[in-house]
Every structure is written in structure tokens, then in C-alpha cells.
Image (cartoon, coloured by chain):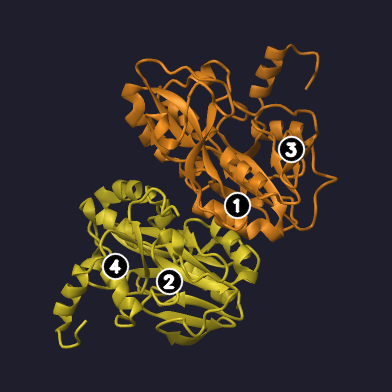
Chain colours: A yellow, B orange
Amino acid sequence: MSETLSPSARTESLRRLDVGGLRALIRAGEYHGHTAGLASGRLQTNLAIMPERDALDFMRFCQRNPKPCPLVGVTDTGDPRMRTLGDIDIRTDVPAYNVYRDGELADTVYDLNELWRGDFVAFALGCSFTFEHALMAAGIRLHHIERDETVAMYRTRLETVPAGPFRGGTVVSMRPIAREHVGLATEISRRYPLAHGAPVHIGDPAEIGIASLASPDWGDPPVVGEDEVPMFWACGVTPQNAIRHARLPLCITHQPGRMLVTDVAEDAEVPVIAG
Amino acid sequence: MSETLSPSARTESLRRLDVGGLRALIRAGEYHGHTAGLASGRLQTNLAIMPERDALDFMRFCQRNPKPCPLVGVTDTGDPRMRTLGDIDIRTDVPAYNVYRDGELADTVYDLNELWRGDFVAFALGCSFTFEHALMAAGIRLHHIERDETVAMYRTRLETVPAGPFRGGTVVSMRPIAREHVGLATEISRRYPLAHGAPVHIGDPAEIGIASLASPDWGDPPVVGEDEVPMFWACGVTPQNAIRHARLPLCITHQPGRMLVTDVAEDAEVPVIAG
């Protein structure tokens, strides 16, 4: 990808790439940016990598908290290929990675060639892009996308079901939805259990322990119109927080917004490429 | 439950029990029979118990084969309580258990009080009762239920995605469905991803490696009417076969038809009781 292109021309050029072209660029270390809107129609996922020692507890945590932690792929121990989601090498095929040591962000890297270990297990978790695309296709407006902002995210008092060292509150994302579309938005998102499913709460933020919508814990402050209702979905930051609070000696995630782009169709009933 | 009741009076008496009453009876060792039609509206599940050593691979197998192996609950290692699905003690709350040693059926028991070990992990897997109830509620006839027979099940050439020692063909159950209801039956079952989801095949059995519908590998031979189409769903016998073929030194399952009855609503979007 030539660096002489203007930013908008570069974005247009990226958007035209199919999943194979985009992945080749990322694998070659030539793209470290956001993946929103790229490789349209393909499932994108959150990523968590940890030693096998903690993997069974983390899988139990995902199973017990399927709305914030919808598990769509897991590697064999030590195998960097995420075979069930496509021709993927987890060491190179994500634009940027965060490395946590003892729960603290220790480093940001663009590949894991040096860090990969024979006892690593990688997990791919569904993300909200999938149901957002379905909402927009149904004519439901999403302000944060129209404004090119980051969706507002909040800590809540909805506790996760713990597993081993993994625990903590559910983090939610909030989207203001036109009152007449609340039922439709619920119904559509429920169809995507591997992308957080139906909302966990609709309406008064205080009921789930959010003091002020104007002060999100992550993302941009939202504007909720008079004829709109705040709708809250479980969010992929939940497992990231649980992982950090578990203070694993070593754990690696994607950088927020820089997702793993898979070969799987975004609306696949079952996100597995049989092997 | 008095043994002096006639069989039909006994069945009626069982059907009137709520989930708490039924579980108390099973826990006390006073009922070892089938659970079909009992504790109406509650999720029933298949059961697999194995040492922790094999649990991560088995969870990977379930994640990679979600249609035959929809995982709805997993215990902490050594903890016999399946906390996320209700007030359940997995050692006593299933009517009857099969004990496999090195892949061979070694024993049938009515509780696990003697066999339970500190390294055991128990898995609950969704079963077809859930979508069958939804099909019948929509007015779709299911012959095997009307005839009080066991649904016909077949080995296929649809291979599962392997994980560690777990592998093998997908086993399917077949239900003849009126031609005009095929679309509706597909749509309804797709809504229950934790009960095998949409069919894996519709129509010609030869296409998935079934030589003759008249000779099922398990269950009763079916009759397919002229205006009916054979519909094939992934079946919970698949993980049981995978477990047996893995030849684990020790593994325990429920006895077919004698399921774990949970506190969770059968149509719950997410089968977890938080806590």
C-alpha cells in the first residue's frame, strides 16, 4: 500500500480489498490500523492469547458469560493457526497486539513471531460489528458510525459468572436507538448470539449502575435524542478486563479496533470452516 | 412415588411434578426412567464427565462442532455442582449413568457418589427436546413422538472438526416433515443454536452417506410419507461417539433418554443462571 496516497484515497483502496488481500497486507506488516468497514461481510473477532495453564478456566468463563464473551474460535495448544476460521496465522494476521504482563500493559507489537510459545492457546471472540451491520442494513441509524466516533462503553454492576481467576463486572456498549426501532433492534441483534446477542438492558442507565451517560468509561460521549432510547449490549471489553484483573503472568490481546478478520461469512449460523 | 400406581397413572403423576419435585425424586434414587415430557418448559441436557486432563480438548471439540455439541454448562474441576444451570448436584441428579472405561461400557449406575473424583469436569450439552417442543407448538407433526418411538439416528460421512483425541463422523437424527412445513421447521430450529440449530441436511439421505433410511443405526425405523421430506439434524450421539472413540481411561455419560433436567427455561436466550 503506497504511502503517497491521500488518507481518503488510502481508505478507499483498503475498502476495495477482499479478505485475502487485506490479510496479505496485514501479514506483511504493512497495515496496523483499524479494521472497521474492511473486508465487508466477513466475521471480525476480538483476540485473547494465554498459556494453556489458564485456557480451561478462560473457556469456562466464556461459556458462562456468552453475551460478553461469545467464543467463535480456539487454537490447538502451541499451534498458531486458527484453522477453523480460515487461512489464519495468529502471529501475523492481526494489525496490532497488546502484551500484558501481570495484568499491566507492557508492550504493543505488530507481530508475535518473537513472543509465540509452544504452550499458547488463542481465542477468537465475536464482536459487535456483526450486529451493527445487520442493524444498519435494516435502516436503523447508528450515530457513532455516522460521526466516525468510537461507541460509548460503560462499566456496570452486572456481575459476570466467575471461572478460576476470571471475574468482574460486565462492560456494555450503548447505542441510542429511535424509539420506534427498539423492538426491531432487539429482534435483529438476538439473531446474532455470537456477536453479543440481544441487549442486556434498555432504558434507564441507573438501573445497571451507570451514573452518567455523558461520561463513558471508554469511547466518545454520546448524544441521545429526545425520541431515542439508550440500548445497552454486552461488550468485548468485558473479557479483556477479566483477563487483566486475573493478572496472568503473560497474556496478549488485539489492540482495540484492530480486529482479527476471518474467512467466515459474517452471518454464518455456525462460524466454523470444517476441516 | 408409590410403586402401586398403574404405569399410566405413574406417568401422569410424574408429568405433574415441577422441576424441583422431579429432581428431588431423582436425587433420592427413586426415579431412573426417561425424562421426555417431564418438567415441561425446562432445558434438558446431555451429560459428559471426564478428568480435567481431557477437558480442554473436549471443550475445543464442542466449540468447533457447535451443532452436534452445543455446550450449555461446565462445572469447575472437582465441583459436582452445575451451578450455572440451577441447584444441581451432578452426582445424583441424573436418573441413570453409563460408565465407560477405555471406551467400553463398563457399568450402569444410579448415582456417582462412589465414582466422583476431585479432578472431574462435567459438561452439559443441549438436546433436541428443545426444538421439538417448539416445532410441535407451531403445529408441525413429529411422528416418533406421536408413536412414542425413539427418533431414528444415523452415522453420516459429515466429519467433525477434531480436537485432541476427539473426532469422528457426525451422527444425525431424522424427522419426516410435511413438505409445506420444511421452511418453517428450518426457521424455527435455527432459533435454537443450543439445541442443534437448523438442519444439517434436507432431502436425499445418500448425499450425506446414509444408505437406507429404513435401517437407522439407533432408534426406531421411520416411515416417511409421500408428501413428507426427510430432515436431518445434528445429534447428541456425536459427542458420545467421539468420547468413546477417544478411549479415555474413564468417562461417564447419562443413559440415553435419561437427561439432566435443569432450572433454565427451555427458550432462554442464554442458558445461564447468573451467580
Indicate the position of residue A4 as horizontal and vertical percent values.
15, 88
The structure residue drawn at horizontal position 42% and vertical position 30%, both measured from the top left corner, is B205
Residue indicated by mark 1: B166
Q: Which amino acid does label 1 sit on?
A: Phe
Q: Nearer the viewer, mark 4 or mark 3?
A: 4
Picture quarter with the N terminus of chain B:
top right
- In whole angstroms, how far apart are the C-alphas of marks 2 and 4? 13 Å
Horizontal and vertical percent position of residue A43: 35, 60
Q: Which chain carries label 4?
A: A
Q: A243 or B122: which is nearer to us?
A: B122
Q: What element carries label 2?
A: loop
Identify the amino acid type marked 4. Answer: Gly
Q: Along the polypeptide, which appears first: circle 2 or circle 4?
A: 4
* CB under 8 Å between discs 4 and 3: no
Query: What amino acid type is highlighted by mark number 2?
Result: Asp
Distance between mark 2 and mark 3 Cα atoms: 42 Å
The residue that disc 2 covers is: A89
- Residue in the image at 30% along x and 80% along y: A31
Give residue A20's mark: 4
